[in-house]
Amino acid sequence: MIKINDKYFDTFIDKNRILSEVAQLATFLNSDYKSQEVIFISVLNGSFMFTSDLMKNIDLDCEVSFIKVKSYSGTSSTGDVNEIIGLTSSITNKHVVILEDIVDSGLTLDKIKKLITKENPKSLKTCALMFKPEAFKGEFKPEYIGFSIANEFVVGFGMDYNEKGRNLEDIYLLNKEANQVKTKSPSLVEIN
């Protein structure tokens, strides 16, 4: 168990399982885009670790670009999407793959896809490390999904709780019981 700010989390998916799934996603992308030029668009901040590890397994003629949007406050999505940093590469008539750390409501992804579609890409797909089908309300489900999970709050491997925990190698799940009791444990690691 770890504590980040005022919340307790348990290990959910360890780094070896994450890296194995990322390599599998890269295998699918390498096959589907063989002999094609691709622009990967990583959605910051959460996707930076996923993007880094995915790119280590990509064998394509590709570019990587970054955009930044925000739709979270604390442990829940606000539903409001504000573009902060936009694209710097031309994507007109190019294959584009959006890289997301996690897709839950899908509202952020919908906004991003609509903005990118205006630039006339040749194709547009999404690769998400994690997907929450129960929470999904969007129009555009990711075409490539690493892990489908319940509608629970997770942190680590780029994902955060109030900007903390992004650097964790494993993915952690919010422990609802411990957060009600505010348990102290000898194996507790605190991140403040």
Image: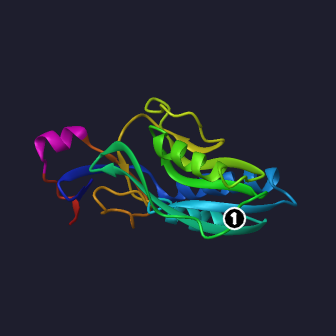
Q: At label 1, which amino acid type do we have?
A: Asn
Residue 164 forms part of the magenta stretch: no
In this view, 134 is above or below 2? above
| Residue at position x 65%, y 66% in the image | 55
Q: Quadrant of residue 58?
A: bottom right
Quadrant showing the C terminus = bottom left
Q: Which secondary structure dominates the residues rendered in magenta?
A: helix
Q: Which residue is mark 1?
A: 57
Residue 71, image x, y percentages: 38, 49
Residue 138, image x, y percentages: 51, 34
Left or right: 129, with 166 as reference point: right
Left or right: 52, with 162 as reference point: right
In this view, 109 is above or below 5? above
Question: Number of labelled discs?
Answer: 1
Residue 179 forms part of the magenta stretch: yes
Rendering colour mode: rainbow
Please give the range of residues in magenta: 176-183
Left or right: 3, with 155 as reference point: left
| Residue at position x 37%, y 45% in the image | 80
Residue 32, image x, y percentages: 80, 50
| Residue at position x 30%, y 55% in the image | 161
Residue that lies at the very extreme toward the right in this rendered image:
35
Query: Looking at this view, is 116 or 34 the one in front?
Result: 116
Residue 114, image x, y percentages: 59, 45
Regarding mark 1 in the picture, which secondary structure is present there? Answer: loop
Q: Residues within 10 Å of mark 1 (few under 14, many from 20)?
A: some
Query: Looking at this view, is 32 or 26 the one in front?
Result: 32
